Structures are given as C-alpha cells and as structure tokens.
Amino acid sequence: MSGHYTEHLENALARETMEKNKLEIQYNELKEKHDRTQWLVNQILFDKGAFPFICGTMGESDQNGMFDYFSICPAFGSDATYTYKKVT
C-alpha cells in the first residue's frame, strides 16, 4: 500500500512541477510583452510624463544613421539636456 501512496505522491509532485514550469514560462512571456509595451508607451507619450527622450543630434551620421552626439532631455518641458557621445 505504501508503494502505491509513494507513487501517487511522486506523480502529484511531477504534475505540480510541470504546472510550475508552465506558469514560469507564461510569466516570462507576459513580462517581456509588458516591457515592450511600456517602452512603446514611453516613446509615444514622452510629452505626457517624466520619460527621457532624444531631443537633438549633432555631428555626422554613420552608415546606420547614428550620429556622433545625442542630446537627451530628462522630461518634456525640462530645461536640462544631457549630451552623449557615440563610442565605437
């Protein structure tokens, strides 16, 4: 009888482990979708919140369209800007 009970517990543990793995995969997929959506919202609605955005470029652009310098504004309406230099 105890062998049957042990087998039942092992099967239940295996099912729970499989379910946990499925939930972890679903969680990671949802987190990735959330992060991409949040990034898109931040890019589209930069003027609605305190999101940094590119407010200018300087210098020559390379074959990929990347400029030598980028000006970043920490939030829409801010007087502060930060300039970043491209490093290869």
Image (tube, helix red, strand yellow):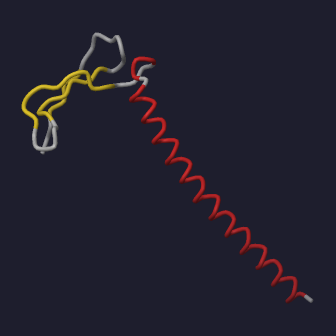
Q: Is residue 26 above or below residue 13?
A: above
Residue 30 position, x and y percent, is 56, 49
Left or right for 7, reference 22: right
Residue located at (15% from left, 37% from top): 86
Is 16 left, or right, of 27 in this rendering?
right
Q: Residue 23 occupies which quadrant of the picture? A: bottom right
Q: Residue furthest right?
A: 1
Residue at x-position 39% and y-position 29%: 43
The image quarter in which residue 44 lies:
top left
Instruction: Name the residue at the left extreme.
Output: 60
For the residue pair 65 and 85, the one nearer the viewer reads as 65
Q: Residue at x 59, y 52 (%)?
A: 27
Residue 25 point in image, percent of width and height: 57, 59
Residue drawn at x 85%, y 89% as measured from the top left: 3
The x and y percentages for residue 81 are 24, 18
Location of residue 26 with respect to 52 vertically, above or below: below
Image quadrant in which the C terminus is located: top left
Q: Quadrant of the N terminus?
A: bottom right
